[in-house]
């Protein structure tokens, strides 16, 4: 045995290694299966998949890429959370600090923003691909619905995040988007039939979004919590359902 | 016994090991996309405009790009419709797709020929209507939400004469109540015509037997959703060609 082989076998036969990786190192079919089943991250996948699940021509990789964009926004978002305060007095200044002072701040912020936009584009492409391959047909109907809910949550994540820089673009874009809520029938003070329910400018669907009559510091905090905690948690739960359904029904493909 | 064992068909499958094949593919794609994202993030900076100033509204004030489709719809419909009802119908319509599509073809593979109309409808709703509205809102709208060519300089003082007219007025009605009656008749007629055309179309393209299998419930849901979807280009045509602002005017809702 050469020196390299001896070092390698010393490592992979060691007590430490074997306590971490509970399967052998050689490339055998058994070890290939155990790589997946004994790893908490990889066992999201089945041990064996249908052949076309690997083909980009079939899947376009868009579902996986959407999830990747989500992970990237989470990681970059955690970095941003160290330096950003969701308080109206500090928010804009913190953005300036992040962009110009913090090490890698500009890069992290840019990656966060472009990954977020990319996530929306990828989720639309994923929906289109799933439609074209008919992967919503029985027995996968409910997973399509979970997917539509995830689409809405993706848009809401992006929308709540849009406000956080607290610059002109942020508050006015969110104003335009949220102003539609005041026109909700029954629940918006400028919508039809508002007087039946007693909706008024500080107590209607739009005020519920804003936390008050107008965009202000209360809105910033509210959108921050929605953006960082609430919507990601709901999205994670729905993603778990989404992935579980794929495991249960099998990755869609032509019948054999 | 031995012959039976030999003749027993082994289950056919086209499966391959996740590790290494799928994981390798995912890793390479993730690496490539991550590298592209980092390069993009190094090159193009995220925008940061001046500090928030509630007393100064920018002109134009545009929603995030993915909502620009809805903002563009505000030209043709009131906010309760363009901002609340239609988006809700889009979401509900998307959710309903697996239940109204009973075509067994194309389940898990690409197939245009046997799913032509389903694919074309989705394409029309998503790529044509939704994406086109976003493109218009992004590139063709400037101050005052006036139309500008993408290369034109945005003139904040551009004044466009507002020559809009309501449909009943255009036709000659002057009394509010009779106008409302006329409008409701027209809207009802729109739905009747669109749904009848859709019915005739389904019979011609898919056949009467399909229609029986499809059932009244699925047909109705699909027909109403398609009529509502088509109401957008119809209203756009009325507005752009005839300057019609509202088809129906009531003290409670305008359409």
Image (cartoon, rainbow, N blue to C red):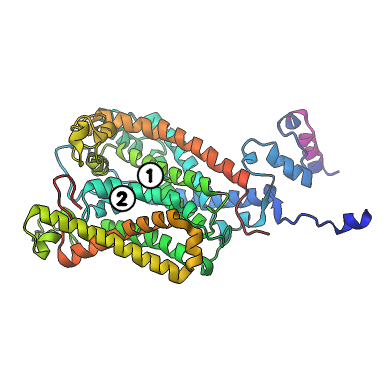
Q: Residues within 10 Å of mark 1 (few under 14, many from 20)?
A: some
Q: Residue furthest right?
A: B2
* Contact flag, marks 1 and 2 (Cβ < 8 Å): no
Horizontal placement of B19 versus A158: left or right? right
Along the viewing direction, whichever of A2 and A57 lies nearer the viewer: A57
The Cα atoms of the two marked residues, 1 and 2, are separated by 16 Å
For mark 1, what is the residue? A155
- Residue shown at the point (26%, 28%) measured from the top left: A218
What chain is tagged by disc 2?
Answer: B
Residue A79, image x and y in percent? Answer: 43, 34
Residue A98, image x and y in percent? Answer: 35, 36
Corner quadrant of residue B57: top left
Looking at the rendering, the stretch of residues picked out in magenta corresponds to A6-16
Horizontal placement of B106 versus B56: left or right? right
- Residue shown at the point (32%, 30%) measured from the top left: A222
What chain is tagged by disc 1?
Answer: A
Q: Is residue A236 above or below residue B83?
A: above
């Amino acid at each position: 045995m050469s020196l390299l082989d001896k070092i390698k076998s010393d490592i992979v036969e060691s007590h430490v290694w074997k306590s971490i990786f509970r399967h052998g190192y050689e490339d055998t079919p058994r070890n290939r299966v155990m790589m997946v089943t004994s790893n908490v991250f990889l066992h999201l996948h089945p041990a064996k998949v249908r052949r076309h699940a690997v083909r980009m021509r079939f899947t376009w990789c868009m579902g996986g890429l959407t999830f990747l964009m989500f992970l990237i926004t989470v990681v970059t978002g955690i970095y941003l959370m160290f330096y950003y305060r969701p308080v109206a007095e500090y928010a804009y200044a913190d953005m300036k600090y992040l962009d110009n002072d913090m090490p890698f701040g500009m890069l992290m912020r840019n990656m966060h923003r472009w990954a977020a936009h990319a996530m929306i584009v990828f989720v639309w492409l994923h929906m289109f691909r799933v439609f074209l391959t008919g992967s919503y047909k029985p027995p996968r109907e409910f997973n399509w619905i979970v997917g539509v809910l995830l689409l809405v949550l993706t848009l809401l994540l992006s929308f709540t995040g849009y406000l956080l820089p607290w610059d002109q673009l942020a508050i006015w874009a969110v104003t335009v988007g949220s102003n539609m809520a005041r026109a909700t029938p029954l629940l918006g003070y400028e919508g039809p039939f508002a007087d039946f329910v007693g909706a008024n400018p500080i107590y209607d669907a739009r005020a519920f979004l804003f936390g008050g009559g107008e965009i202000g510091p209360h809105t910033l905090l509210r959108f921050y919590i929605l953006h960082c905690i609430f919507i990601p948690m709901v999205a994670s739960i729905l993603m778990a359902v989404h992935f579980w359904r794929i495991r249960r029904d099998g990755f869609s493909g032509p019948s054999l | 016994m031995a012959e039976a064992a030999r003749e027993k068909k082994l289950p056919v499958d086209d499966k391959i090991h996740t590790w290494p094949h799928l994981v390798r593919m995912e890793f390479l794609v993730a690496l490539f996309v991550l590298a592209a994202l980092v390069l993009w993030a190094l090159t193009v900076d995220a925008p940061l405009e001046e500090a928030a100033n509630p007393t100064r509204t920018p002109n134009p004030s545009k929603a995030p790009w993915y909502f620009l489709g809805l903002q563009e719809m505000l030209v043709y419909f009131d906010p309760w419709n363009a901002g609340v009802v239609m988006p809700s119908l889009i979401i509900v319509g998307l959710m309903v797709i697996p239940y109204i599509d009973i075509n067994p073809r194309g389940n898990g593979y690409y197939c245009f020929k046997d799913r032509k109309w389903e694919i074309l409808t989705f394409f029309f709703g998503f790529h044509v209507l939704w994406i086109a509205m976003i493109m218009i809102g992004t590139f063709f709208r400037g101050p005052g939400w006036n139309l500008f060519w993408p290369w034109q300089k945005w003139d904040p003082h551009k004044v466009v004469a507002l020559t809009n007219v309501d449909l009943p007025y255009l036709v000659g009605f002057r009394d509010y109540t009779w106008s409302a009656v006329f409008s409701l008749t027209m809207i009802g007629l729109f739905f009747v015509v669109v749904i009848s055309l859709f019915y005739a179309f389904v019979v011609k393209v898919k056949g009467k037997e399909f229609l029986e299998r499809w059932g009244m419930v699925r047909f109705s849901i699909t027909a109403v959703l398609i009529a509502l979807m088509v109401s957008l280009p119809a209203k756009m045509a009325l507005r752009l060609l005839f300057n019609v602002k509202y088809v129906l005017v009531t003290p409670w809702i305008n359409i």
